[in-house]
Image (cartoon, rainbow, N blue to C red):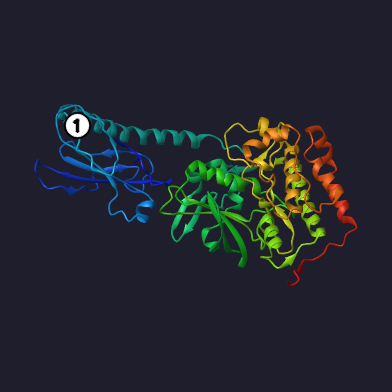
Amino acid sequence: MLLWDAPLDWGGRSEMTYRVLCERREQDGGQWEACDDRVLVLPDSNSLTSTSVNLTVSPYHHYRLSVQARNDISNLQGVQHSSTAPVTLHRLSAPPVVTIVNITQNPVAAVPVTMPRPQKGPFLWTTVGVLFAVLFLLAVVPSAVCILQRKYSSMPRLPQEVELLPIHSGISYTRVQQPEVISQPVNTVLQVGGDDVLDLVQVLGTRLADSLMEVLVQRHQLTLGKELGKGEFGSVYEAVFVQDEVSTKVAVKTMRVGFHSQEDLHEFLREAEIMKNFDHDNVVRLLGVTLQRDEDSPVPVPLVILPYMKHRDLRRFLIATRYGDIPMFVPHQTLLRFMVDIAEGMDYLSSQGFLHRDLAARNCMLGDDLRVCVADFGLSRQMHDSNYYRQKEAIRVPIKWMALESLSESVYTTKSDVWSFGVTMWEIVSRGRTPYPGVHNHDLLDLLLMGHRLKAPDDCDTKLWEVMYSCWRGSPLRGQASENLLTNLKLFCQNCQLSRLVRRPPT
């Protein structure tokens, strides 16, 4: 095994890849040559993200190994050579030495690593023993198979109504007994381009592959277009999805290439697993999931297919209309309709036993018909035996949208989502402004404990403010308010003829 330390200076970047170069020579003073296929470097010699490899080398040759470290800042700075650290392995008769190399910008001096010369005597006897064992098995196994086959054929066959197919991917299937029909196993192979296929059970695991099987689609059904948005961990693309010979404009959410592991892949697809059974007009539906290979990624890249929403997220739309980037005026009645749509979607999620935990205007999508759909279920959790969820691991959370009990005790209930809904209402009335302006995240909990809450936005209706403020009361009072929340919001819209968007008058 060859180990090395990461460079001390990464140039301000968070990514680093390594490459292991191997040279060998047979005699002292001979010419160094590139290693052939007999020298194995595992898991690979290129695009490594870990700081160790396993080597398979011969004790009868000299070896010289070099470790190169690079990241994107190398190209930006015009660096000619990667950060390298060579190490030389000599054939000496001393115990093996494992060397850890610190990578710097200057070459490291050669360090001898020796290996013992193998003893021929024990190796010869071991080889002979293995050959005798193989010959013995070749003689015994066929005889045993013949005996068992005769014994099985002599047993009476019991009548049965159905016959089980071979188990595949952790699933058993039954069918009416039809001897003339040949059973076909369940297909767990996904075509990701050309002749390239993935074994889903191997990539996702049996449970996740089984759970997503009904929504998995072939990669060739999807054509990616321009990038719609980009975040810290991934991007959203415009795309065309072809299903049953019908082309549909969709949005595709994917992870950032090259910066995730198998665990990250499973966590990313967990959101799709949550969404797959959602069926409500105010909750974003999952259209499909596929995977693709990327040479810069150690694991397949997931592509989650979602409906295309023309106006994208609600916060962006509110800000754009407020500043005139979208030349439309949004009347008060339409803002109320946005709130009702979100309340309908959240009520559905609660009925299905889900906590959203990240409700905000930025996580609500707005379609061409101005219908709002609740989206982004990365932090969502399903409650089974209890009516609350306690966050135990440290994760990134939306501080200014979180309920008091969630900030202080990391406890989440449906009442916590009601608190977040109240903050989202405040965002809508203020047309996309950030809540608690001027308040730092670290100071928010103390202010809430002292009884401070958001101030009423300008021109906010008094009755609407009462409904909004009820979302931020103590947990018992908030629970009573949540029961009438949707009803109260609908009352505001009941006698209102919802206005369509009209173009902003010229100034």
Q: Position of residue 333 (x, y in %)?
A: 82, 59
Few, some or many C-alpha atoms within 10 Å of disc 1 (few <14, some 14-19, many ≥20)?
Answer: some
For the N terminus, which image quadrant? Answer: top left
- Give the camera-side residue of 205 and 137: 205
Q: Secondary structure at mark 1?
A: loop
Residue 156's place in the image compared with 503, above or below, is above
| Left or right position of 104 against 312 | left
Name the residue tied to disc 1: 115
User: Residue 118: horizontal and vertical position, in percent?
Assistant: 17, 30
Query: Does residue 8 appear left or right of residue 215 in this picture?
Result: left
Q: Residue at x 64, y 53 (%)?
A: 286
Number of numbered discs: 1
Tell me the residue at 66%/52% (across/down): 362
Label 1 is placed on what type of residue? Met
| Residue 412 in view, yes or no | no
Whether 322 is drawn above or below 147: the answer is below
Q: Position of residue 461 (x, y in %)?
A: 84, 51
115, above or below 175, in the image: above
Residue 26 appearing in the image: yes
Q: Position of residue 205 (x, y in %)?
A: 52, 42
**In the displayed structure, would residue 48 be above or below residue 391?**
below
Residue furthest bottom as drawn:
506
| Rendered-image quadrant of the C terminus | bottom right
